[in-house]
Amino acid sequence: MCVPTLSFAEARACVLERVKAHAGLPVETEVGLAEAAGRVLARAVRADRDYPALARSVRDGFAVRAVDVPAALRVAGEVRAGESYACEVGPGEAVEIMTGAPIPRGADAVVMVEHVTREGGQVYIDRAAKAGQFVNPQGSEARRGQLLLSPGQRLDFSHVALLATVGITRVPVYAPAPVAILATGDEIVEPDQTPEDFQIRNSNVYSLSAQVARAGGCPRILPVARDEFGDTRSKIERGLEAGLLLLSGGVSEGKYDLVETVLADLGAEFYFDRVLIQPGQPLVFGRVRDKFFFGLPGNPAATMVTFEIFARAAVEILAGQTETALPLMRAKLTRDFRHKMGLTRFLPARLSEDGAELTPIPWQGSGDVPALARANAFLVAGADREEWKAGEWMRVLLK
């Protein structure tokens, strides 16, 4: 079996291309507004009317005709938000107006209350006004029938506000993508057990479950597959009942690393089985029985990182999302950093509260879960550069 080793960029491009080419649309369902955030929209949303429906004021002040100022004007009335003004503003008149209130007929500008002097039934305005000043025109935010949200968008709090604004209370969304999660290894015990010194608790399936849910998937944790061909095969076949299978461990070249052997026996097509990154070099991606799978390394850091930079995109696409992007940014290093070139590295780090500075976190390798928990980001060291000095900009993957 000849499977290519890819760079980070090549492997990510491969995942996006393959999954997009074969992912069908998930099942459509409906949720209420309160449950819509984080879900993927299934149908287009259009404006049900002009927004705003009438021209309205964006300041507290006085609605005037711009040609009439500067001057002393008679206060002809008042209009508040939630009301309309029945009369027309004539020459030499002003109408007191509140933020959000509709602009009276005849007026074409608003003068802020801070810029007028009021005495009895008159206001004195000592400055000119431009037509349209502090006026939000009818339809300036959206026109009736205008496309506001497209299918495939993951809904955030601003989208929820927009849905409520246009009167949508039952939101058409896609059902979360079912994702099976399978850990392999004789050394694994469950979190509620007391491990022997040579055993480890099963943390990877729970970190993956949290990551899958955050990406819009529906995680299904399977019982651990032992390092035996028949048990590994039966557990993998069970995992293939979901839309995507995530395996943790068993993808290196050891005697009891059986994942690739079992998948090959099931007729899998392998797109890559090694990526030039750290942590996470032994990473398998492929397709079998029309289902995608990722064989993620068993070390916790490698599991977390490879999910974020590769498998997360697959979950998002299978959940109906049309666009997926890594949450990368740049920050200034607080101290020198160097590494051996040839691999793209994703290492635990802390971003300052303002996101401007990045500090690498000392760690003991891919199994150092306490260091991962202290991190709020991963610094990204490119494969083609050896050294960065304190104060230089460096790429950051948000955690």
Image: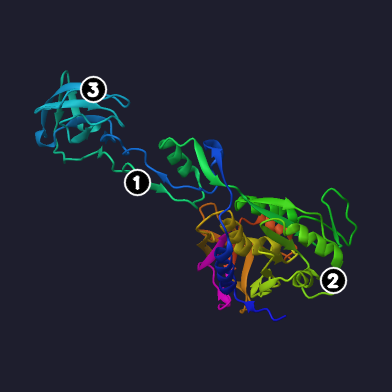
User: Which labelled disc corresponds to residue 56?
Assistant: none
Residue in view at x 27 percent, y 34 percent: 54
Coordinates of residue 311 in the picture (x, y in percent): 63, 62
| CB-based contact (under 8 Å), mark 1 and mark 3 | no
Dot 1 corresponds to which residue? 146
Residue in view at x 75 percent, y 64 percent: 299
Determine the residue located farthest toward the right in the rendered image.
196
| CB-based contact (under 8 Å), mark 2 and mark 3 | no
Q: Is residue 393 magenta?
A: yes
Q: Amino acid at mark 3?
A: Glu
Q: Secondary structure at mark 3?
A: strand
Closest to the observer: 248 or 321?
321
Coordinates of residue 142 in the picture (x, y in percent): 33, 43
**Quadrant holding the N terminus:** bottom right
Distance between the alpha carbons at the discs numbered 1 and 2: 58 Å
Distance between the alpha carbons at the discs numbered 1 and 3: 33 Å
Instruction: Please indicate whether residue 192 sits to the left or right of residue 115 in the image.
Output: right
Determine the residue located farthest toward the top in the rendered image.
120
Distance between the alpha carbons at the discs numbered 2 and 3: 82 Å
Closest to the observer: 78 or 385?
78
Dot 3 corresponds to which residue? 78
Sooner in the amino-acid sequence: mark 1 or mark 2: 1
Dot 2 corresponds to which residue? 256
The local crowd at label 3, few if under 14, some if 14 to 19, many if 20 or more residues have their Cα within 10 Å, is: some
Determine the residue located farthest toward the bottom in the rendered image.
2
Sooner in the amino-acid sequence: mark 1 or mark 3: 3
Q: Amino acid at mark 2?
A: Tyr
Segment tinted magenta in the rendering: 381-399
Q: Secondary structure at mark 1?
A: loop
Instruction: Please indicate whether residue 358 sits to the left or right of residue 265 in the image.
Output: left
**Quadrant holding the C terminus:** bottom right
Q: Quadrant of residue 205?
A: bottom right
